[in-house]
Each structure stands twice: as structure tokens, then as C-alpha cells.
Image (spheres, helix red, strand yellow):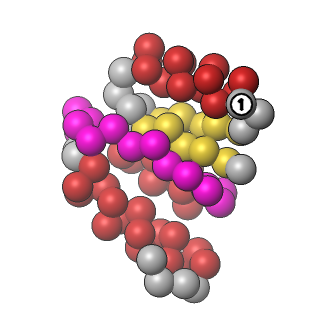
Amino acid sequence: MQILIVDDEAPIINMLLKRIGRWGYDALSAQNGTDALKLIKAQPIDLILLDVYLKETSAIELIPKIKIIIAEATDKPI
């Protein structure tokens, strides 16, 4: 399972990366919406942990973009 952590606070990302790694999962991280979208386009992601309040954008603005990328990649509506 590939998990993506999207948060603009490095200490939170580091804590989650360690915890998820201990549970035996692979995790990637992005500190902003732009980087998150690039990662989602580049590889399949099974779970996204998304901070609601990012500095450059909000989760509310990012979620529709994520849905479009995943729908295009899988040919399945979300």
C-alpha cells in the first residue's frame, strides 16, 4: 500500500512517515498541493492523508483536482 502524506509542517510529516513505516507501509510526502499533484500523477497512491489547511491551497481546493487525476488514470469515476 502506497500512502501519501500532504502537510506543510515538516515535524508532522516526519512523525507520520516514521509511524507508517513501523506499520509496514510505504509512504511518500509532499509539503504543498503542487508537489502532491505531481506525485499522484506519477504513481498509484492508495491512501492520501491531507492536511485541511495548507499554506498555498486548501484541501477543499485540492480534492477535486485529485479526483480528476485519479479518474483519468484509472478510467473509473470517484
Furthest residue to the top? 11
Please identify the quarter of the rendering in which residue 41 is found. Answer: bottom right
| Residue hosting label 1 | 23
* Farthest residue, direction right: 24
Report the span colored magenta.
43-56
Question: Is residue 15 within the magenta segment?
Answer: no
Say which of 25 and 54 sits in front. Answer: 25
Image quarter of residue 61: bottom left
Note whether residue 11 is visible.
yes
Q: Is residue 35 visible?
A: no
Q: Position of residue 43 (x, y in %)?
A: 65, 57
Q: Residue at x 43, y 20 (%)?
A: 12
Q: Quadrant of the C terminus?
A: bottom left
Nearest the viewer among 16 and 65 is: 16
Total labels: the figure holds 1
Amino acid carrying label 1: it is Trp
Residue 23's x, y, as percent? 71, 30
